[in-house]
Image: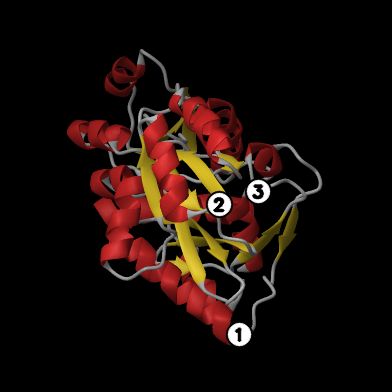
Amino acid sequence: MTAAYANLFSTVKPSDFGRVAVLYGGKSAEREVSLKSGKAVLEALQSGGVNAFGIDVGDDLLQRLLSEKIDRAFIILHGRGGEDGSMQGLLECLGIPYTGSGILASALAMDKLRTKQVWHSLGIPTPRHAVLSSEADCISAVAELGLPLIVKPAHEGSSIGMAKVTSASELIDAWKAASTYDSQVLVEQWIQGPEFTIATLRDQVLPPIALGTPHTFYDYDAKYLASDTQYRIPCGLDSSKEQELMELTAKACEALGIAGWARADVMQDAQGQFWFLEVNTAPGMTDHSLVPMAARAAGLDFQQLVLAILAASLEARG
């Protein structure tokens, strides 16, 4: 691995982790992605000599956590119920150390509206937005923000429920569709330009990835199913702009209290300005996923990445 990232891979022995429960699946709209991520993480841990086993999170979770001998948990649940602070709170009540961010940071990052409010207060650029709860709100949003716009459920990931709109009538339809996923729906200014995703691992920012897709935006299909999505590492920015992006990412994650690992999504407009969209605190770990891709660029293979994430739980919570 490159010298800049040499301290990311912990030298702890597999036995130091004890018995590790990989928590995956769950009941969120991102269940299918989490099942794939969990399988990959579990295989990497076991092949690395870690005493790990999987729990597909369901109604019997509390019973499993109480009855099994568990020294720590690797959280690879995506979306609500796993990435929003609730699982983190349960594990803390049971005294089980876990990977990733704590309760507050997880809950905050999962809430797109609160995330934007924190960033705005600290001068971290994020697109202008409005909250939709009626057709009248949709009409007002078009007048205030202009067109086109992008609609997002406030508490979903993997681009679920998102849609680009170019008229007030389309916005009303998209708001109604997004409302089936979440009671709180946001609409944001559409930022025209390249998209980047930037992973963080143990307080270091990994090489940015530039994304390209023939889809209208980097939607669920482009993320997990399509074979024509383009990924560029190096990302194509000149060195000063890449450094600016990485420094802004560190600031944006620090503002939310991110720990262990995460992935930020960022747009760049025609003037070169970066705009932060959201941070994922338990990103995907599938064969299409971006954090493993960034880790490879830093010199870490998938198993080393998984072990580095798990090792951070030793440092953060003893």
Tag 3 or tag 1, which sits nearer the N-term? 3
Mark 2 element type: loop
Choose top left, top right, bottom left or bottom right for residue 106: top left
State the separation of the CA atoms marked 1 and 3. 26 Å
Numbered tag placed on residue 146 in the rendering: none
Identify which residue is drawn at 61% across, 45% down: 166
The amino acid type, in three-letter code, at marker 2 is: Leu
Q: Which residue is painted at 45% across and 21% down in the image?
A: 27
Q: Position of residue 210 (x, y in %)?
A: 66, 64
Q: Which residue is mark 3?
A: 217
Where residue 82 sits, quadrant-wise, is: top left
Please name the amino acid that badge 1 sits on.
Ser
Q: Is residue 268 left or right of residue 313?
A: right
Q: How many numbered discs, if any?
A: 3
Residue 206 drawn above or below residue 63 = below
Identify the mark at residue 147; answer none if there is no mark: 2
Q: Name the side, left or right, on which 124 lies relative to 45.
A: left
- Residue 257 in sight in this render: no
User: Which of 183 and 46 lies nearest the eye of the viewer?
Assistant: 183
Q: Which of the two residues, 197 or 53, is positioned nearer the viewer here? A: 197
Of the pair 14 and 184, the residue shown nearer to us: 184
- Tags 1 and 3 in contact by the CB under 8 Å rule? no
Q: Are marks 3 and 2 in contact (CB under 8 Å)?
A: no
Q: Residues within 10 Å of mark 3 (few under 14, many from 20)?
A: some
Per the image, label 1 sits on a secondary structure element best described as helix
Q: Earlier in the sequence, mark 3 or mark 2?
A: 2
Measured as percent of width and height from the top left, residue 148 is found at 58, 51
- The residue labelled by disc 1 is 239
